[in-house]
Image: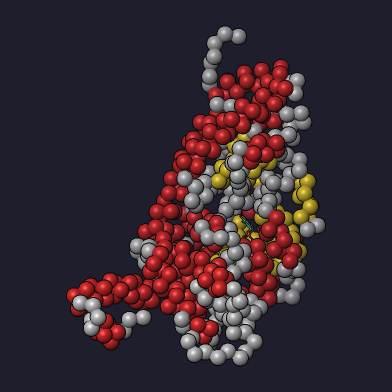
Amino acid sequence: MFSPEAYALAEGLVSKAYINQGSQATARRSKLVTSLLSERRLPKDGWDDHSIESFLSEAAMMDSNNFLDNVGVGEREARVYSPLVARRHWNLAHGIGRSGDVAAEQPKAAGSSLLNKLTNLLVADAMRIAGLEDMGPALVLPLATGMTLTLVLLAVKSKRPKTATKVVWCRLDQKTCVKAVLSAGLELVVVSPKLVGDQLCTDLDAVRAAVEAAGPANVCCVVTSTSCFAPRAGDACSDVAKMCAELDVGHVVNNAYGVQATALCKEVTKAWRRGRVDAVVQSTDKNFMVPVGGAVVCSGKGNTEIVDAVRKSYPGRASISPVLDLLITLLSMGSHGWQRCLEDRGDVYGYMRTKLGECVGEFGERLLDTPGNPISIGVSLETHAKLSEDGKDVSFFGSMLFSRCVSGTRVVAPGKRQDVGGVVFDGFGASHDAYPVPYFTAAAALGTTREDVDRFCAQLRKCFKDFRKKAAKRGRAGDGDALDAAADRLAGVNLGGS
Ligand SMILES: *Cc1c(COP(=O)(O)O)cnc(C)c1O
């Protein structure tokens, strides 16, 4: 707010030397803004909160609702009743986009429009740093992954022949994607992954067979996923991309939390370099540690048609909130902070595999061998399933962990049948009709610390012990002894005696 003239006048009130020093301090902050606007990428070092707040507040002053002399007589004048709500949004109340395009400029909101454009550019830079090369423009939407997938599917459908109503989906047991397909009015064709050792991998022959059986002209697209629960591996997106190019069908990649893993970013890059990828969707909360509410759509720079179509088909204006959360986070991280988050995550994944492997080995269980999944880790519950009445009670293990304040693990016991929007899945949870082993999963996701892993293992040990006690109480002590012996053998522990 201080012009050169204002500084000169200030010198009439406070010593020139002090004002000079003060003005240099504010000039340093202004410089952050000018380099951000000229470079249009993440600042190397994260900004302090004060700089971020002044930047947002100055941007807000460029929106008509915050003009000193504005008289608003339209039906949408960004009026906010509660001062608390206004403050929560830095008085940015006009939202983003116009009815014709969610990334278009708002005439009444130069500030909001600027922040929105910057966010799309900065997130693209962050994704490039994470390993997504040759990427086209990124589009942040104030919708979580599932709703964004629906919009993307509708955009792909609009570019396909009228008959193309089928979506060939590489099964991944997460209800959202199924609902995204059904909500878009499309028909789901499920392709199961194939079991290779412990791991569930993309069955390329089955994908091809499904597209050919439906007839390519009747297929809207194939949907693959990168990030998923172990023991499923990330899909062979690049092989599917090549196949989609050859068969002339669309290809959408659900990269929900894949940005955080270099290996998954590499696979997506390979996919859009070598084959057909119409759009890739990723969650903002899972990849950038912001509250739920946003997703990023992108594609390779050679094929940006669908991202453009999504921008233009988005009905109406949109909330700036998720955009703002992401912008604040990215400015606060800077490229160095972001790189550190990514490196730490990779490190914690290795640490979790080691520590968890040691821990569960003590109880006769083992890590599932899933080299194609760089985030989620599966742990067998085979030994413990034998302890429970019908092999199904192992799901109880999940509630035991939960009551010990461990959240995020997921126990999958075979044989669960589940209806999702009318589509019935056998063995639901495992992404396979009959995965042979009961197991639980845990994830080394962005933001997980080594301390989290240590505390998790400590609680896990208590749960294993409790589980055994409960099983013994159920009058199956004999089996419990047998189990202990088996566990000791597996763990290589020789207690001596007999
Ligand atoms: C989280 C997730 C979703 C759903 O995301 P929302 O952001 O809740 O819509 C879909 N698919 C996968 C693989 C996910 O991990």
Question: Ligand 1, what quadrant?
Answer: bottom right
Q: Nearer the viewer, residue 333 or 263?
A: 333
Q: At 47% across and 45% down in the image, what residue appears?
A: 449
Q: Is residue 250 visible?
A: no
Residue 339, quarter of the rendered image: bottom left
Q: At 64% across and 69% down in the image, what residue appears?
A: 152
Residue 484, quarter of the rendered image: top right
Q: Position of residue 304 (x, y in %)?
A: 54, 74
Q: Nearer the viewer, residue 497 or 201?
A: 497
Question: In the rendered picture of this protein, how many numbered marks are placed on residues?
Answer: 0
Q: Is residue 454 above or below residue 320?
A: above
Q: Is residue 114 above or below residue 370?
A: below
Q: At 56% across and 77% down in the image, what residue appears?
A: 93
Q: Position of residue 55 (x, y in %)?
A: 41, 73
Which of the image's four quarters has the N terminus? bottom left
In this view, the residue farthest toward the front is 13
Q: Position of residue 310 (x, y in %)?
A: 61, 74
Direction from residue 64 to residue 170 in the image, left or right: right
Direction from residue 255 to residue 55 in the image, left or right: left
Q: Position of residue 168 (x, y in %)?
A: 70, 60
Which of the image's four quarters has the C terminus? top right
Q: Nearer the viewer, residue 148 or 69?
A: 69
Q: Is residue 182 visible?
A: yes
In this view, the residue farthest toward the top is 497
Figure colour scheme = secondary structure
In this view, the residue farthest toward the right is 422
Q: Is residue 144 above or below residue 100?
A: above
Q: Nearer the viewer, residue 24 or 169?
A: 24
Q: At 46% across and 49% down in the image, what residue appears?
A: 345
